[in-house]
């Protein structure tokens, strides 16, 4: 078990994209020794030589107390904490690689989404690979990497199965510009972080078709209800979805054009293909896989999620958005 102490512990950040780099920068601000791993040796070499992640965070200097490596063993040597910031479709693979190092880690992640084939959340996968006694934590909430890297005020939630570990991560990240709250509801925080990306696609489609402010807030509010339904069915606390990792992240992702999921929805509304929209965004659009996973899971568990299901049909079954809106608006009336 990790102990609360003033001693700086080396933390390894796995994933050198925008969010991984921003979290490494945030951790380095307290002079913590930080290691940042990326799979592509050429990219890591370039970042190391220029001290800038030009692809994801141009113009931000990477300080010298962040050591970069494309060798996972080297990047985790001497660290008792690893923070994974990779897309959800890489999460299991990263955990297996860490397991193969045959060392003990406290594991934290900023990965959002479900595993498509299994419908598992990240903590379920972590328990499957490392066991239920593994110290684990998840970081989520309304936080664009570019704003965190530029030291703009940000607040997030950290959920952990070990209160002391969660508090340590919160303390390591927090400063005058970054505030981390703690909770033990890992399931609720993870579901909020996954489902909000689906709804952001839907709001992007609605805004792209100029359906207006009324439609936008209806999608956000009723989408929150669907998020809560799924969460409570999986054992989450309903109140978690009113916090930063629920409503907070949902509103931000649905309304800001910094959101790649919203931008994907805007592109779909313009009639672009999925492949073209992804190509232009040039980053992983987590909401696509999340839509597929939640659609399957809601069918399996018989959970009523009409908005998420409709977004799934638009993406995967070529349902025209105009028809989708008519279908949603003509459903049987019911109590709120």
Image (cartoon, rainbow, N blue to C red):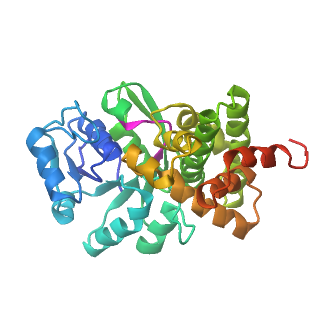
For image coordinates 35% across by 29% down, the residue present is: 175
Boundaries of the magenta span: 139-145
**Residue in the foreground of this view, choosing between 35 and 322:** 322
Q: Is residue 32 above or below residue 102?
A: above
Picture quadrant where residue 236 is located: bottom right
- Furthest residue toward left: 49
Seen in the image, is 182 located left or right of residue 240? left
Say if the magenta span includes residue 133.
Answer: no
Residue 141 lies within the magenta run: yes
Q: Quadrant of the N terminus?
A: bottom left
Q: Measuring 59% from the left and 55% from the top, which residue is drawn there?
A: 315
The answer, for residue 67, to whether it is visible in the render is yes
Q: Is residue 246 visible?
A: no
The quadrant in which residue 303 appears is bottom right
* 78 to the left or right of 141: left
Q: Position of residue 92 (x, y in %)?
A: 40, 68
The location of residue 195, given as percent across then percent down, is 60, 50
């Amino acid at each position: 078990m990790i102990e609360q102490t003033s001693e700086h512990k080396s933390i390894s950040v796995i994933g050198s994209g925008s969010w991984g780099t921003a979290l490494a920068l945030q951790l380095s601000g307290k002079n913590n020794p930080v290691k940042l791993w990326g799979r592509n040796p050429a990219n890591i070499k370039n970042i190391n030589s220029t001290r800038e992640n030009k692809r994801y965070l141009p113009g931000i200097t990477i300080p010298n107390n962040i050591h970069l490596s494309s060798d996972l063993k080297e990047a985790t040597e001497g660290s008792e904490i690893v923070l994974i910031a990779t897309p959800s479709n890489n999460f299991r693979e990263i955990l297996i690689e860490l397991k193969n190092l045959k060392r003990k880690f406290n594991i934290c992640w900023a990965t959002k989404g479900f595993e498509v084939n299994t419908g598992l959340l990240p903590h379920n996968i972590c328990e499957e690979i490392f066991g239920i006694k593994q110290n684990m934590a998840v970081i989520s909430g309304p936080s664009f990497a570019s704003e965190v890297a530029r030291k703009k005020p940000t607040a997030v939630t950290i959920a952990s199965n070990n209160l002391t570990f969660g508090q340590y991560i919160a303390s390591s990240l927090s400063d005058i510009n970054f505030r981390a709250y703690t909770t033990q509801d890992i399931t609720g925080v993870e579901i909020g972080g996954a489902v909000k990306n689906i709804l952001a696609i839907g709001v992007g489609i609605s805004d792209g078709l100029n359906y207006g402010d009324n439609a936008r807030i209806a999608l956000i509010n009723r989408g929150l209800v669907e998020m809560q339904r799924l969460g409570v069915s999986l054992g989450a606390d309903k109140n978690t979805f009113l916090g930063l990792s629920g409503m907070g992240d949902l509103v931000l992702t649905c309304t800001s054009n910094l959101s790649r999921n919203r931008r994907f929805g805007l592109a779909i509304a313009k009639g672009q293909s999925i492949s073209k929209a992804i190509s232009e965004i040039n980053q992983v659009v987590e909401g696509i896989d999340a839509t597929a996973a939640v659609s399957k899971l809601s069918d399996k568990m018989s959970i009523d999620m009409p908005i998420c299901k409709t977004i799934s049909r638009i993406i995967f079954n070529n349902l025209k958005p105009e028809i989708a809106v008519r279908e949603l608006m003509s459903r049987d009336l019911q109590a709120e």
